[in-house]
Structure formats: structure tokens, C-alpha cells
Image (cartoon, grey):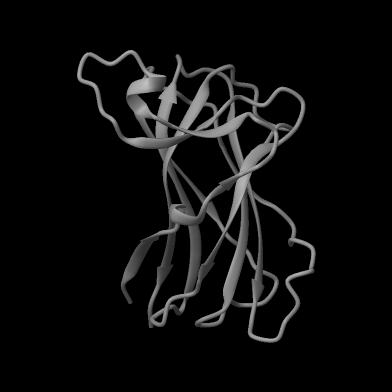
């Protein structure tokens, strides 16, 4: 069995809050060594979940163990609890897209030993679909900073989202 990671950030569409938007690292950070790398700014939540949505297809060699990998840069001194949530819905051909997202899966961190402003950060969320994903299904995914848990006052600069899975 091999573990694979597939980037899925390409279709990420920020929500309409205005608190998640596309930008570049050199615009958001005061860097001595500027990097004009695209990112999505995810402001810290102030009353509601903020994030975005995307859709991706389950790859041909998928067998199981779905994980969402969230990668980005910390924009501020890390403290308190950084929390993410994800909701998903898997759809096959001839199944309605007009179906509610399934229950959320979450991950959070409150231990910041070794982290500082402008550091790379990676968080993972184990996805628990109600029914097993099937090859070629479309997965509708909603990623957000979970306001009910997140107590940070720094922004997160999302640079990549990966779908991690194992093959047979």
C-alpha cells in the first residue's frame, strides 16, 4: 500500500464573507526575500466560520484512508487555538448535487513550540464520509476556519490543499 497526495486547491472558491480572498505572499508579509507566490488569505474568524468550497474527483488508484492536508503560512505570532473544519459530500453520476454536506470533520492546534510569524504550517483532517468514496466520484468539499473553536488573532495564508489517500 502506498500513500499519495494530490493537490486540489486549483478549484478553491472563497466564500462571500470578504474575509477569504486571493493574494500573494509578498503582498501579505513583510519579507526581506520577497516571494510572489499565490495564496488565499483566511482572516481569523470573528463571529462565523470563514473559508471556501471546491470540487475534485476521486482518483483511479484510490482505495481508502482519505485525509485533507491544509498547507500555508502563519501571518502573525501564533498563539491560542487555530482550528479548521471540513464538510464533504461524494456524488456519483446521476446523483443530485442538491444534497446537504455531511457532518464536519475538524482539526486544531494550540501548541506552538517552534513556530513563529511567517512559518510554514501543515494541518491534517481525516475525512469520514458516510459511505466509502468510489473511484471517479465527485467530492464537493467545504473548508473553513472553525469559529466555534478558533481563538487566534492571526491570519492564515493558504498555499495548498491536498487530498491524501492510499491505494490497494
For residue 51, above or below residue 161: above
Q: Which quadrant holds residue 5?
A: bottom left
Q: Residue at x 53, y 19 (%)?
A: 154
The mark total stands at 0
Does residue 47 lie above or below 158 as drawn? above
Q: Position of residue 165 (x, y in %)?
A: 43, 68
Q: Is residue 61 above or below residue 65?
A: below
Residue placed at 51% from the left, 81% from the top?
136
Q: Could you say which quadrant of the image residue 21 lies in?
A: top right
Which residue sits furthest bottom? 94
17 left or right, relative to 136: right
Q: Is residue 114 visible?
A: no
Q: Give coordinates of residue 73: x percent, y percent.
A: 39, 30
Q: Which residue: 45% across, 79% down?
A: 63
Percent across and percent down for residue 134 are 55, 82
State which quarter of the image contains the C terminus: bottom left
Question: Which quadrant, please, contains the N terminus?
Answer: bottom left
Q: In the depicted view, which residue is nearer to us: 135 or 124?
A: 135
Residue 105 appears at what percent x and percent y? 65, 52
Between 106 and 75, the one lying in front of the other is 75
Q: Is residue 89 left or right of residue 32?
A: right
Give the image quarter of residue 88.
bottom right
Nearest the viewer among 34 and 76 is 34
Residue 10 appears in the rendering: yes
Q: Residue at x 38, y 78 (%)?
A: 167
Amino acid at each position: 500500500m502506498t500513500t499519495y497526495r494530490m493537490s486540489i486547491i486549483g478549484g478553491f472558491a472563497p466564500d462571500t464573507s470578504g474575509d477569504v480572498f486571493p493574494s500573494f505572499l509578498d503582498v501579505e508579509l513583510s519579507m526581506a526575500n520577497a516571494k510572489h507566490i499565490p495564496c488565499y488569505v483566511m482572516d481569523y474568524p470573528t463571529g462565523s466560520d470563514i473559508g471556501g468550497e471546491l470540487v475534485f474527483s476521486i482518483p483511479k488508484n484510490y482505495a481508502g484512508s482519505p485525509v485533507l492536508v491544509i498547507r500555508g503560512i502563519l501571518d502573525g505570532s501564533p498563539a491560542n487555538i487555530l482550528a479548521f473544519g471540513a464538510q464533504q459530500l461524494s456524488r456519483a453520476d446521476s446523483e443530485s448535487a442538491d444534497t446537504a454536506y455531511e457532518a464536519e470533520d475538524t482539526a486544531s492546534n494550540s501548541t506552538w513550540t517552534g513556530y513563529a510569524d511567517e512559518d510554514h504550517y501543515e494541518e491534517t483532517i481525516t475525512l469520514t464520509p458516510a459511505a466509502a468514496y468510489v473511484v471517479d466520484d465527485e467530492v464537493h468539499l467545504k473548508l473553513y476556519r472553525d469559529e466555534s473553536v478558533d481563538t487566534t488573532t492571526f491570519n492564515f495564508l493558504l498555499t495548498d490543499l491536498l487530498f491524501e489517500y492510499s491505494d490497494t
